Amino acid sequence: PDHLALLYVQQFLQERGYLKALRTLEEDSGLLYDETKLEKGGKLMQLVWQHMECSLQDCPEQNEQAQELAEDEAMLQSEGAHDFPQKIVSSIEGAHPANILCVRLIPGRDEVLTGAGDGCVRRVGFDAQSAWTTHLGGGGVLCIDLHPSHTSCPATQVSSEAPLQEHLGAVGSMDGCVRLVNTGTGACVAVCQSHSKYAGGLTWVGDGTCLVSCSYDHSVVVHGFGGSNAKDEHSPDRDLLTIIRRVEFASVVQHVAALHDGHSVAIAVRDSCFLRILDTQDKERSEIITVNLNAAGDDHVSFFPCHVAVSPCGRLLLVSTNKGRLLVLRRRGANNHSWRHCPTLGFMQLAVENFHNFSATWHGDSCLAFAVAAGAQVWVYHTGTGKVVLKLDLHKINVRGMDFDGRRLVTCSFDKTVKVLM
């Protein structure tokens, strides 16, 4: 028992990054830590949480939350699916003469929407055949997101009578503009000068009546979407996309991700140990909710969030940090404004490089996750144990972004290719 208890404490110190304390404990105990001795991570915190669950039995509300947490932990600790994408079935080459900076899968189609450093957006098939190419100007295309109502209709069959949102994509560029593109024709149907610097991230929220973007100019902008067809595709409609609210931060806003409540977004800000939660429907413009990423609860900035991925169930967040730590946060009950560290999980460590491009996504069962790693790789993690299941060698140089639809994983790179995995 003493030996096992010592192992649990050593594992806790290793997972939390208390390496000096771990070395001291090894020296005092004469036992060197060997992570292979324990198959799963977070063993000490699992015992702590079990004790807390027992102490909450007399409180129905807290007991219900504890039960939800136990279910989430069981899901994360499960073996998960063994059929996750790991085989390259298509390599799309020649789609752009410049670096490909972002990619999105077209729902139900063997096609992707790509954005490149030359300011072009292209709809291209897995066979490398292009449906259209549109040059948006204003520098490279940094991010793309498809409207929640986007259909699987082929580009050649998109009707002019169909609602615009059924074939609509939002695009953020280096010129700070946010544009709406008709994914059937490639026409730019709306443009908004939302930012003064790079528009590095954007996301549709809820049913798609709201679009949120973030920028290097330290701001997050909430847009309203009109939802009607543009009058003239050769003259973008400025009234189709309007600015509702602008929120300023102290540093560069790295990423925004829509939460599953239909009206909130998680915001990653550089040089801050806090994740922000913004309610886009908050007419009172209350103070923005903050979530401390430090497990100890202090405000020391030893790392900051760079990317946020929301799990398919909506109850978990995978936060990529600049130091290569991947953190899993869990929602408290049904409140999308309250998140906490999963107590039985340590952090997952990711190999990163200078000027790393952070991107991560969940597998459908939430116990597996994909993350862009150094060396042009994508690492597959088992989130329950924090261990790397597989390292995928996909590109020649940096992976810039990826997308996953539950069956297919696509990645894009500075090597000007897109890889499709199944």
Image (spheres, grey):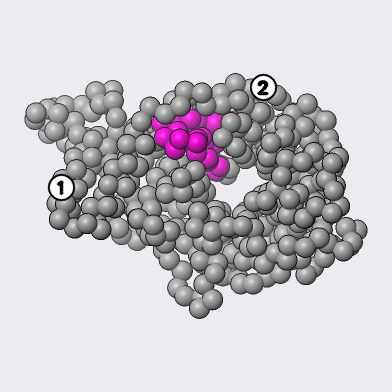
SS assignment for the magenta stretch, majority: strand
Q: Secondary structure at mark 2?
A: strand
Query: Foreground residue, 60 or 221?
Result: 60
Q: Nearer the viewer, mark 2 or mark 1?
A: 1
Left or right: 208, with 275 as reference point: right
Residue 14 in picture, x, y percent from top left? 28, 37
- Residue at the image point whose x is 36% and y is 30% from the top: 78
**Res 23 visible:** no
**Residue 369 among magenta residues:** yes
Q: Position of residue 81 (x, y in %)?
A: 46, 27
Name the residue at 61% across, 54% down. 203
Measured as percent of width and height from the top left, residue 144 is found at: 68, 49
Q: Is residue 191 above or below residue 368?
A: below
Residue 19 horizontal side relative to residue 3, left or right? right
* Residue 376: mark in rendering: none
Are there few (<14), some (14-19), or many (20+) residues within 10 Å of tag 2?
A: few
Amino acid type of disc 1? Cys
- Residue at (25%, 26%) from the top-left corner? 38
Residue span colored magenta:
358-382
The spot of residue 212 in percent (x, y) is 61, 61
Q: Which residue is mark 1?
A: 54
Tag 1: Cα neighbours inside 10 Å, few (<14), some, or many (≥20)? few
